Image (cartoon, rainbow, N blue to C red):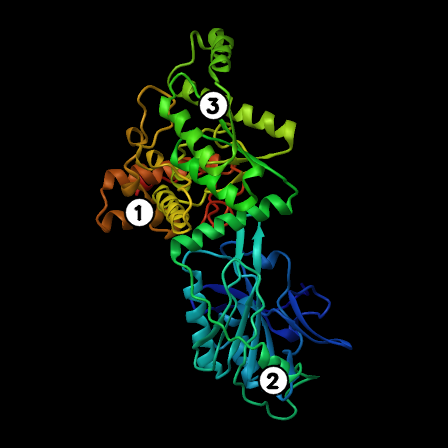
């Protein structure tokens, strides 16, 4: 950055702050996020991103300088097409309005907009605002695919100058969407180059203006989890995946997603019963594997459990007991899976959900050991919804339900001590998940949660557990982000933190 360059914060349409520079205050040699228009003769226009988001998962100020130079408007047979990049269209009276004032009569926006619950509705509402503000139709083109935690859902769309959706591509699929748009011709002298459309007869012959119906919320999330898992494995060179199958709801969902993502032949399950495992744990895991048509191997961990107990006898002045013994079992299972991973090259999929990760109900180097956490951003109550949805899809195709009914109705349990149930350590998930959503995703304070009617003692207990578990979450593998605030890149809290809500 050159000395004395001016910075200003410009509020976006939803209250977020984005940073922009005055174009004449930054050297053109600085690196910017750019979009180019190319003809047969080469590059004819370059649009540089003006507004750099630096919130949630976005860190663009770390890598780019805000855009410089004139806005890019190209002539496509008399129509001035203004080029924008993602954040530039979200801000009222921002770059989109500037392009319209300079003569653009159609706006094209290139986006890598990550998926989150409710994001499609937000995009459409924003595009309606910009279209009405600029009196321009807008083509919103979005990336498709997964990258680490982020899922780019596509759902590219076109709105007319009134903000009505006139075309929408499908979610989580690459698709060619051909749209006929009613756009005004630009005034002479406002564009910098001329493009020519393809043959009009051919264009009309394949014209679609198709509006794909949006997916339901649960279906959309399920497809996001499948795409995120598939792309993480394939793009990082993993040909197969393994996971522990406990006969519980979480591992059943992860196994089903994995099969939908990469196929049954590429997924292998391991049942690893201990002295505390119930009979139905193994039988339910085997039934799930049969329905998914995946290989399952049973490896009892009792010999290793006993061996570790003997090794630690002298150090602990007796056999491991209580939480020490519970965590020991989980870590034995993690060792088994990682050994198989080392020997075969398969990636280990962990099976912990967001509710457990939020309050630290997991074992470091045990159930958290692995390469990819498929449902780390999925609350426990949503896990059940996703399982029921996937079974309903199977029924609609005349296929057997992948997830056995017995898995759906049993009480959640880690089975690390006799007759253990999750609700002995945690509130019922129907009570816990709304509190976690308020505290984690909505950034509500303990005081605000109590004022809204929640039990004060429970609120203080849960918020305290969330804060204490930060050190565990820092050591978790990456996983699919489906909420507007996931642990990790979205919610970054210090581990060393003396703040306590109860001291207010």
Nearer-the-camera pick, 309 or 343: 343
- Residue 465: quarter of image: top left
Q: How many marks?
A: 3
Q: Quadrant of the N terminus?
A: bottom right
Q: Are marks 2 and 1 in contact (CB under 8 Å)?
A: no
Q: Going from the N terminus, do you reach mark 2 or mark 3 first?
A: 2
Query: Label 1's element?
Result: helix
Q: Quadrant of the C terminus?
A: top left
Nearer to us: label 2 or label 3: 3
Q: Residue at x 39, y 56 (%)?
A: 217
Near mark 1 (Cα within 10 A), the count class, few <14, some 14-19 or many ≥20, is few
Q: Relative to residue 204, is residue 156 depicted above or below? A: above
Q: Is residue 350 visible?
A: yes
Lateral position of residue 23 relative to residue 228, left or right: right
Near mark 2 (Cα within 10 A), the count class, few <14, some 14-19 or many ≥20, is many
Q: Is residue 7 visible?
A: no
Q: Residue at x 52, y 76 (%)?
A: 138
**Numbered badge on residue 272:** 3
- Residue 283: quarter of image: top left
Query: Label 3's element?
Result: loop
Q: Relative to residue 353, is residue 286 depicted above or below? A: above
Q: CA distance from mark 3 to mark 1?
A: 33 Å
Query: Label 2's element?
Result: strand
Residue that label 1 marks? 434
Give percent across and percent down for residue 450. 25, 47
Residue that label 2 marks? 80
Direction right: furthest residue: 41
Give percent across and percent down for residue 480. 50, 47
Give percent across and percent down for residue 40. 76, 76
């Amino acid at each position: 950055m050159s000395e004395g360059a001016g910075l200003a914060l410009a509020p976006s349409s939803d209250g977020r702050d984005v940073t922009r520079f005055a174009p004449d205050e930054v050297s053109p040699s600085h690196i910017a996020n750019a979009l180019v228009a190319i003809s047969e003769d080469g590059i004819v226009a370059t649009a540089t991103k003006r507004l750099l988001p630096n919130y949630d998962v976005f860190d663009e100020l770390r890598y780019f300088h805000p855009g410089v130079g004139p806005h890019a408007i190209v002539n496509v047979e008399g129509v001035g097409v203004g080029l924008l990049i993602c954040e530039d269209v979200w801000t009222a009276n921002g770059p989109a309005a500037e392009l319209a004032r300079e003569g653009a009569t159609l706006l094209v926006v290139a986006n890598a907009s990550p998926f989150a619950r409710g994001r499609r509705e937000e995009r459409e509402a924003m595009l309606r605002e910009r279209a009405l503000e600029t009196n321009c139709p807008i083509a919103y083109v979005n990336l498709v695919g997964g990258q680490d935690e982020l899922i780019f859902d596509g759902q590219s769309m076109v709105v007319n100058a009134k903000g009505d959706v006139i075309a929408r591509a499908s979610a989580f699929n690459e698709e060619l969407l051909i749209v006929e748009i009613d756009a005004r011709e630009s005034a002479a002298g406002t564009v910098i180059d001329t493009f020519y459309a393809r043959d009009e007869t051919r264009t009309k012959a394949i014209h679609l203006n198709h509006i794909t119906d949006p997916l339901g919320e649960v279906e959309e999330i399920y497809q996001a989890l499948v795409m995120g898992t598939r792309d993480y494995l394939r793009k990082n060179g993993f040909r197969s995946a393994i996971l522990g199958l406990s006969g519980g709801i979480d591992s059943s969902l992860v196994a089903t997603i994995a099969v939908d993502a990469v196929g049954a032949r590429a997924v292998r399950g391991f049942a690893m019963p201990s002295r505390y495992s119930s009979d139905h744990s193994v039988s339910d895991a085997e039934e799930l594997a049969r329905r998914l048509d995946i290989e399952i191997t049973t490896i009892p961990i009792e010999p290793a459990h006993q061996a570790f107990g003997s090794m630690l006898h002298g150090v602990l002045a007796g056999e491991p007991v209580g939480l020490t013994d519970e965590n020991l079992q989980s870590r034995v299972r993690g060792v088994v899976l990682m050994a198989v991973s080392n020997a075969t090259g398969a990636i280990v999929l962990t099976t912990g959900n967001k509710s457990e990760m939020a309050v630290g109900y997991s074992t470091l180097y045990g159930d958290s050991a692995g390469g990819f956490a498929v449902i780390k951003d999925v609350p426990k109550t949503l896990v059940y919804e996703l399982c029921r949805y996937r079974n309903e899809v199977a029924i609609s195709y005349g296929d057997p339900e992948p997830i056995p009914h017995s898995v759906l109705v049993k009480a959640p349990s880690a089975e690390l001590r006799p007759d253990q149930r999750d609700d002995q350590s945690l509130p019922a998930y129907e009570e816990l998940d709304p509190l976690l959503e308020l505290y984690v995703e909505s950034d509500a304070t303990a005081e605000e949660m109590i004022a809204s009617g929640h039990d004060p003692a429970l609120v203080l207990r849960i918020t305290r557990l969330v804060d204490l578990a930060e050190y565990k979450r820092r050591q978790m593998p990456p996983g699919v982000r489906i909420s507007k605030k996931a642990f990790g890149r979205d919610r970054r809290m210090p581990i060393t933190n003396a703040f306590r809500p109860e001291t207010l």
